Amino acid sequence: MIEDTIAALATPPGEGGIGIIRLSGSQAVAIAGKIFNPRQGTGLAACRSHTLRLGLIRDPGSGETIDEVLVSVMYGPHSYTAEDVVEINCHGGALATARVLQLVLRYGARLAEPGEFTRRAFLNGRLDLAQAEAVLEVIRARSSQGLQAAMAHLQGQLSRRINELSTSLTGVLAAFEASMDFPEEVGPVDQEKIQDLRQILAGVEGLLSSWEEGRLLSEGLKVAIVGRPNVGKSSLLNALLNQERAIVSNVPGTTRDTIEETLQLGGFTCRLIDTAGLRETADSLESIGVARSKEAIATADLVLMVVDLQTGIQEEDRRILDAVNDKYVIIAGNKKDLVGANYDELATFAGDYPYVAISALTGAGLDALAQQVKELVLGGRASRQLDEPLITRVRHRDALEKCQEHLRSAIEAWEKGLPEDLIAVDLWAAVNYLGEITGTTTREDLLDRIFSDFCIGK
């Protein structure tokens, strides 16, 4: 199938400023040339690579003019797929792009499968598998931090680290195999190689330790705003969104259901959930809201607990804090505009939890709250520039966990004095799991699963 020339709409369907039909393969230039009529100069076959040509798309069968376009030609291997690529830049109407795509399919191209352009880039060696997956991460990034991590992956940061570990591990494996094949000349594997193995294990574990942070960067944070009634939870939601999303009232129990909205907070995409005030109530509707609040708390990545600085800390506040102590928690003391600058009671109540005094009415303290979110999620590393690779995909985490398991098994086997051939089996497995991340060792069904997540045209 890689011998075929493929084509697809590379921009979202529907109306827009521009619509791009992308072709890739050995016949890309020839097929596009059949339907493209340049305004001046020669046809596409004589174009230099990475140049644009203005002209008309005409149906050779009927002579009908379909659109005025700009056509770019990029010869392999200096293209996205490392093949010859042509991109026809049409006006962004649904009909115009559909007609142009029909023509290129009629004159020899095949409709691309989901992710097939990026798959070809991988198969042709322009990207490794981790970088190919990063293309989708860049497209789906929902925060500045997530985009930064995705771009680091696309530029090979994670791949380089995996390759370093794999090279070191292959060296240890070679020592074991030499010891087995030439026992008299080489002798048994020494302690130095086992120390190398422990360092490789530490490197794998270091990558795994970044998983939770990477997951939050790629998926975003689910943040539950909790507290007793009338402390200002809905007012805080409205202040963060800068719009009147939730009804605000002095009547306790106004919020009777969870309200969800998404925004950027501290550089992260956060799904904020305004919950009903947590209290014992005989009101059947309010009790349903309280139950849903508890469900939201159970699945939240972060709990933003609001307390009222004007009324002071109540026993209900303490019960709520006890109920969420297994979560990331930030305490927000609301209504600072109504009290003095002494927050000793808030600090005492918060204890080891981060806290900040805010005013949902004036917006005071909201920037500090966003910074607290950032500091908490990044574990105090909010200023770092992602100079170490992060694990953001479940597939990578699973492969590293299996690699870790085999490395531990190999070290334990050596410490027990087990035969070197048994240790080598674990080392081979560990090497293969590292290779699955970058694609040096992979299976066709795995590639099918990975690239099926991509849109057609990418």
Image: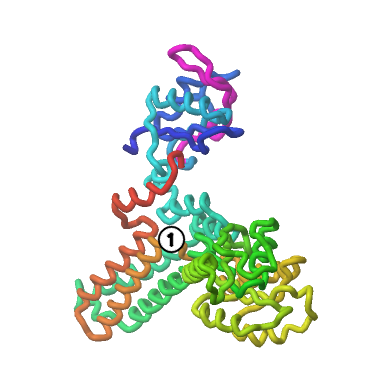
Image vertical order of residue 449 relative to residue 311, above or below: above
Badge 1 crowding class, 10 Å Cα cut-off, few under 14, some 14 to 19, many 20 or more, is: some
- Tell me residue 168's x, y (percent): 38, 70
Magenta range is 50-77
Q: Position of residue 7 (x, y in %)?
A: 43, 33
The residue sitting at 39% across, 45% down in the picture is 119
Q: Position of residue 65 (x, y in %)?
A: 53, 16
Q: 134 and 42: which one is in front?
A: 134
Left or right, 270 with reference to 105:
right
For label 1, the residue is 393
Seen in the picture, residue 411 relative to 427 is either above or below; the reply is below
Locate residue 335: give its quadrant.
bottom right
317 lies above or below 301: below
Reply yes or no: does residue 225 show up in magenta.
no
Seen at 45% across and 70% down, the residue is 207
- Disc 1 is placed on an element classified as loop
Residue at 43%, 56% (x, y): give it: 130
Q: Is residue 135 left or right of residue 270?
A: left
Question: Looking at the magenta stretch, what is its main secondary structure?
Answer: strand
Side of 424 where 245 appears, left or right:
right
Quadrant (top left/top right/bottom left/bottom right) for the N terminus: top left
Hey, what amino acid is under mark 1?
A: Arg
Instruction: Locate residue 305, reporting x and y percent.
Output: 60, 74
Say how the picture is coloured: rainbow
Rendered residue at 43%/71% (across/down) = 208
Q: Is there any visible trace of residue 30 in the rendered image?
A: no
Magenta-colored stretch includes residue 54 = yes
